Amino acid sequence: MKALLFGIVLGVLLLWPTALSLTATATTTLLGEPVLVAFVLGAAARPYLPTWRGWVR
């Protein structure tokens, strides 16, 4: 069990810089798309916006 945990910790430590680099690259690529950023912000704000049901009739 100790060897398994040691292997997991060692694997995470070895892969951490690569994962950090990939995460940073993916984040900057996604934030570079204004349409995607606007969609995500709109989707996040939707539950907090008031509903306009009365004037639709």
Image (spheres, rainbow, N blue to C red):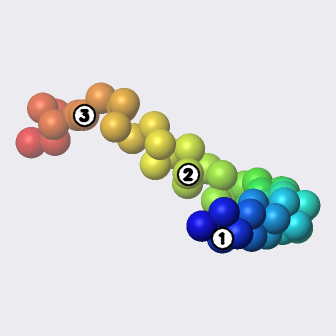
Could you tell me how far apart the alpha carbons at marks 3 and 1 are, in whole angstroms?
Answer: 54 Å
Pick whichever of labels 1 and 2 is earlier in the sequence.
1
Residue matched to label 1: 4
Residue matched to label 3: 51
Secondary structure of the residue carrying tag 2 is helix
Image location (x, y in percent) of residue 45 = 45, 37
Contact flag, marks 1 and 2 (Cβ < 8 Å): no
Amino acid identity at mark 2: Val
The residue drawn where x is 24% and y is 34% is: 51
Residue matched to label 2: 40
Q: How many marks?
A: 3
Contact flag, marks 3 and 1 (Cβ < 8 Å): no
Q: Which mark is residue 34?
A: none
The residue drawn where x is 81% and y is 65% is: 10
Image location (x, y in percent) of residue 38 = 61, 50
Nearest to the observer: residue 13 or residue 18: 13
Q: Is residue 42 left or right of residue 20?
A: left
Pick whichever of labels 3 and 2 is earlier in the sequence.
2
Q: Nearer the viewer, mark 3 or mark 1?
A: 1
Q: Is residue 44 left or right of residue 13?
A: left
Pick whichever of labels 3 and 1 is earlier in the sequence.
1
Image location (x, y in percent) of residue 21 = 89, 62
